[in-house]
Image: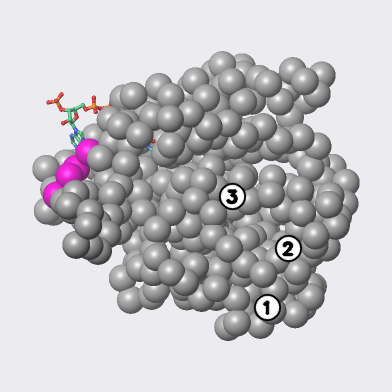
Amino acid sequence: MKIIGTGSALPEKSVTNDMLAGFLDTSDSWITTRTGIHERRLLSTETLRELAMKAGRAALESSGVRPEDIDYLICSNVANSYVSPSLGSIILGPLGCCCPTFDLNGACAGLVYALDMADAFLKTNRARKILIVAAEQPSRFCDWHDRATSVLFGDGAAALVVTEGEGFIDFRLTGDTHTDVMYYKRSLEPTPYDRVEEKTTPLVMEGREVFRLAVEASIRDVDALLGRNGLTGADIDMFLLHQANMRIIECIRQHLEQPKEKFPTNIQHYGNTSSASIGILMDELSRAGRLKNGATLLLSAFGGGFVTGAALMKWSEIQYK
Ligand code: ACO
């Protein structure tokens, strides 16, 4: 499998740390030093559906593939206003696609999970051209009175078009049950039979424990992919890591003893956009001409569950109009 098109979309509204400090007991210096985040984009006038469509259209356009020639649309999304239909179903028709679609929830690792699944579909001839859209609005999971979580996230969408080719070399996905360290619960409708009282609980996160799990898991995935492919960190041209916290990225970088230039970031401007983060970063780097033909990339993402996904790949340059 190889990537032949990329796209991304971000909300217009930028919210700085100082703006948050206007209603939360926080400060620009706390947020910047603990996370590396200076501002984030938050949905206000647009909808997640519009962001997902914009990213999807940009990816299709850059790939030169017509929407009607897409064989599968895989959407990565943790939650949106609709439980059903899926976000994939909602954007499928308006995008001009006519194919099977479903959403997957791989938390922040969702895009890597979607890539792994697309790779399997291509290898088993279930599809020849696949559109992946990762669209997330974590700003709507948070309690905006909770300074420990709300400052971390931003909304955004990314999309990739993939087809057969010599791009992806190896994947490593993992899962583990750690439901207490990070969760967001939505209440379901009551029935006369099920007496369990439920209420929606905005995102709860044990920040320090999530930090530890994230660093450990990403290092384990990266080392495993490097080891079993006979590579070292020096063989990788760029590490595209989930943009959750600048300090998490720095811990992984120090473990690999590789220069900062190999770890591009955009968390400063967008915060943690969940499963869209690696896709947005990839789209920006590719459009800026920073991903060269044949460059070896290592993607690594981790998120609620706890789930992780990593991929080793060679980049093929995309021509943007
Ligand atoms: N502003 C000011 N003070 C704050 C804020 C804030 N926004 N948030 C917490 N604090 C306070 C705490 O109340 C605490 O105060 P206390 O010492 O008086 O009790 C103090 O700052 C230190 O809090 P810690 O939680 O220990 O701070 P820490 O250094 O661990 O940083 C952080 C917190 C940034 C959340 C860090 O733990 C982290 O990044 N964890 C990983 C989070 C993450 O990446 N989650 C998503 C990953 S997976 C995915 O993407 C879905």
Q: CA distance from mark 2 to mark 3?
A: 13 Å
Q: Residue at x 82, y 19 (%)?
A: 230
Magenta residues? 143-148
Tag 2 secondary structure: strand
Residue type at mark 1 is: Cys
Tag 1 secondary structure: loop
Q: Picture quarter containing residue 170?
A: top right
Within-10-Å neighbours for mark 1: few <14, some 14–19, many 20+: many
Residue type at mark 3 is: Leu
Residue type at mark 2 is: Ile
Q: Residue at x 64, y 25 (%)?
A: 222
Q: Is residue 182 magenta?
A: no
On the image, the x and y values in percent for residue 186 come to: 28, 55
Label drawn at residue 130: 2
Residue carrying label 3: 111
Q: Residue at x 66, y 20 (%)?
A: 223
What colouring style does the render use?
one colour
Q: Residue at x 23, y 50 (%)?
A: 202
